[in-house]
Image (cartoon, rainbow, N blue to C red):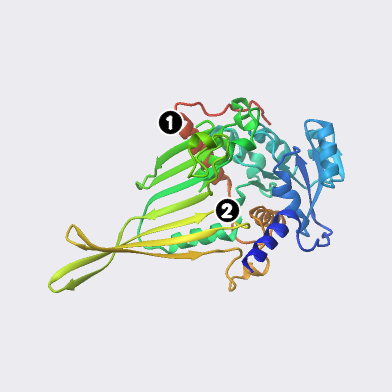
Amino acid sequence: MLLFDFLTRVYYGVVSPPTIPKKEDDAIRIGLIGASNIAPFAVITPAKSHPGVIVAAIAARESNRAREYAQKYNIPIVHPSYEALIDDPSIDAVYIALPNSHHFEWSLRAVQAGKHVLLEKPCCSNATEAKMLFNHPLVTAPNAPVLLEAFHYQFHPAWQAFLGEIRQSPGAIESVFSQFYLPRLLLGRDDIRFHYSLAGGCLMDVATYCISAIDEAVVATFVTPDSQRVRVQGDMSTAGGWPSFLPASWTKGIPSLRWPKSEVVFKPVLVETTDQNGVQLQHFVTRTITIWNHMLPVLYHRIDTSDFHTLHREEEIVKSWSEVSYKKAYNWPEADERAVFYKDWWSTYRCQLEEFVNRVKGRKGSGIWIDGDESIAQMETIDRTYEKAGLMPRPTSSFEI
């Protein structure tokens, strides 16, 4: 049964939904700016199961690439340029998955044309661009088009369940850790992720997820104003060391495989003081909450809540033990009204698309959203991390409206 459930989620969520609903008369018509590798996962497949979304057009830097892409994914309209796509009155929204250096310009151009924007992360090349974008009068005006940075994992019930466990836990947070790896063999040396001029770098790709929760790989430690320690680890180059029982030199060309995870460790909490035979014992609990594979939870994920108990007699630990509970959340809890609309096989991208459409349509939705202030704070943290590492933040665009 577990294998069947897994295969069902994978097929419905990643390949094709169980049914293709009839599209609504007022369905949002989305145009793709860029013939990207991520669009099939982020928009094209999720749109199949959404009655309120039609992927209607595409424009790419190379016209041949756009035509081939459109034929492969059954996209009816191919525009000769990005400008032609955003000027198309039949297009309501755009999905921008261009190199990071182009995000600022084409987001503003699209908003100026009255298009809603689903913008791949990171939203911009640096914090200066992020502030100019999200504080621009075109974006902040009443009834302005919707602009969303696509940190898709936040929209899935699994991530929200993880946050719920954190909020319900006693005590203060002591430290946070997040990791995400992308096997080196999946990327060519000329991949745009490695080009400084295109605002590339690990911190501008996989590690930006870790900060949201230097330069092919990054390990960074942050200290928050209330002294919490946050450590992030992202890597687009690591290979070797897997399988672990073989010498590293033998596995040099094999990508390292590590689950994406985020982990929160709480400070010890005194739960009770007891008196045994005239000796006072203090009972402390240190809690750690971990979510495994929050990036692709529809395939598999797990939320571990581990409590480490210690009994202290003055400075001495006289006894210790651990208790661990496990949880999964492919949907909202049954009693939650959101569970009626969400499906267990929805990917993080499908959840994100649902809330993007809800915001465009003015519907209540799940209540999960990423606002401009969060996107700006994300880019500020990335810039400071580069500077602390002795590296330059990515170049600022000269584009103006």
Q: Which corner quadrant holds the N terminus?
A: bottom right
Question: SS at mark 1?
Answer: helix
Q: Position of residue 385 (x, y in %)?
A: 46, 34
Decide which of 334, 124 is in the foreground and name it. 334
327 versus 205 height, above or below: below
Give the secondary structure at mark 2. helix
Q: Residue 56's x, y, as percent?
A: 82, 47
Q: Earlier in the sequence, mark 2 or mark 1?
A: 2
Residue sitting farthest toward the left: 278
Which of the 4 quarters of the picture holds residue 337? bottom right
Where is residue 200 shown, x and y percent of the image?
60, 31
Query: Label 1: how many residues lie within 10 Å, few (<14), some (14-19) or many (20+)?
Result: few
**Which residue position holds label 2?**
154
Residue under pointer 1 = 388
The residue at 67%/65% (across/down) is 4
Q: Is residue 322 left or right of residue 182?
A: left
Does residue 395 show up?
Answer: yes
